[in-house]
Image: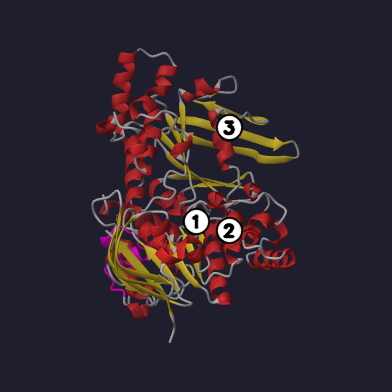
Amino acid sequence: MKKEIIQFTDFTFKYRTQKRPTLKNINLTIYEGEKVLIVGPSGSGKSTLVHCINGLIPNSYEGEIEGSVLIGDKNPAKAGIFGISQVVGTVMQDTDSQFIGLTVGEDIAFAMENDCVPQDNMKDTVKKCASLVGVDSLLEHAPSALSGGQKQRVAIAGIMTNDADILLFDEPLANLDPATGKYAIELIDEIHHTTNKTIVIIEHRLEDVLHRPVDRIVVIGDGTILADTTPDELLSLSTLKENGIREPLYIAAIKYAGAIIKPNDHPSDIHSINLQYNKDKVKSWYQSIEKTEPAMDTEELLSIQNLTFSYEEEEPVLSDISFSIQKGEMISIVGRNGAGKTTLSKLICGFIRPKAGTITYKGVDMAGESIAQRAEKIGLVMQNPNQMISKPMIFDEVALGLRTRGYEESAVKEKVEHALTVCGLYPFRNWPISALSFGQKKRVTIASILVLEPEILILDEPTAGQDFKHYTEIMKFLEGLNKELGITIIMITHDMHLMLEYTNHTIVISAGTLLANDRPAKILTTPKIVEEANLKVTSLYYLAEACQITDTTGFAESFIQYDRKVNQ
């Protein structure tokens, strides 16, 4: 019989600054060698549960505790953070905040240096751990120079040096492109099999985590455990949808078809799911969906022709990129980390200048325009709102661009209040920004751009780190800006769901070149393009194939139309 390694018994926790408990009567046991996925909407208590497992509660975050928690036979309150760190290794969502050393080798060795491990032993352990995660050739590199996937591997190597029994991964896919995220899940699975360590994963992207098997899924909602069962059992229930957690797309499609999913159909794996009794239902449902073609404006707004750029003379970042954007489109720009997507947005905004090629707006070359002149037409919203915000108060932040341009204060007030109303922030106009959530801060940054009345809005990873509820809220909001105000929206994203559901046109950048310029569903049902660009084939493609539906692109597009209609 397996030994209990994490045990919560009638556990309740209330932060010192809050009136109500964040976790309520938690009873959860995780056994040695298990691989457990924890899911739940934002505010459900997932992060608090993580802090209880790695010892930050009660050692860094104070509060009232009822019941008990044991982590590897240790009471976190008595063992302290150092004691629990010997049992639990944590890979955080933001790996940059986890790096200490100037080189990869130094960073992996950091914990051992604190423990005064002899240098020869330290070097051997660093090489062994680096080799295990595939970064042994990067030991002399600076962590800041690595890609998102490489940074994550270095972080994993660092926590493995002290041979912790529990490895805790907090949203490991948040900042990775789809293929790198797939590799990360494969790497975690490989570590699980080769070391038999206990693995705990906290992640919004359920379908992506299930690329490799997990033993159990624990669903958290409003501070309580709503489900603790196998993936196959959970996917046959309605628990996920009822609690605002996205089901895998292929599961949603099967359920829309009126089919009943049973645990013994093995629904957790799209490649081995038993569709014997459901195949015909899926085909009939697909054939019954009325297909509609979205109306498109034919006015060309932005044209990129033969664009080439390099930061260093011999290493082009973008080579001969050409495409055009129509007025009123919602466009996604996708590709692997480092493909040149963000560089492309900087060129459009005028932050950097191309080596060759042209960018024209309504037929006029913008080469002679300053950044300020381009900002009248094109607004850029960065991924992290904290990097854009410079004022302590919401009103002043949104007003900043207008005041810089010399607008009268009466006009500033009118325009700012209108932008805040559009963004759903008018009731908070006199609030300090520090009182807002991450999603609300994102809306402040959008309002600060909208107030300048641009025709094009570029957003870098607009839904990164958002759960399904907040993802849907921000995308419905952006969709409203697009339809009601006629703003053309360009989104740089790693989120294949966003690309498929909300955009009508996708630009694929790979190794600095234009790989594809097509409908999102066409791209995500073309394995060759997906592989080259580090994307991920949609599970709807595999479901269509399994149901002998030849038009896989049409099936994916029909699903999206149906899903949007049902969830309006």
Say which element carries label 2: helix
Q: Residue furthest bottom?
A: 1
Q: Nearer the viewer, mark 2 or mark 3?
A: 2
**Can residue 539 be seen from the camera position used here?**
no
In the rendered structure, which disc, 2 or 3, sits on the residue that comes first in sequence? 2
Say whether marks 2 and 3 touch (CB < 8 Å).
no
Residue drawn 28% across the image and 35% down it: 424
Check disc 1 and report the residue beneath it.
Answer: 92
Say which element carries label 1: loop
Mark 3 Cα-neighbour bin, 10 Å: few <14, some 14–19, many ≥20:
some
In the rendered structure, which disc, 1 or 3, sits on the residue that comes first in sequence? 1
Label 1 vs label 3: CA separation?
A: 32 Å
Say whether marks 1 and 2 touch (CB < 8 Å).
yes
Check disc 3 and report the residue beneath it.
Answer: 347
Q: Magenta segment: does it hold 436? A: no
Which span of residues is magenta-colored? Answer: 240-261
Q: Magenta segment: does it hold 250? A: yes
Q: Position of residue 32 (x, y in %)?
A: 46, 77
Q: Position of residue 266 (x, y in %)?
A: 39, 77
On screen, residue 59 above or below 165: above
Q: Tell me the quadrant of the picture where the N terminus can be found.
A: bottom left
Indicate the amino acid at tag 1: Met
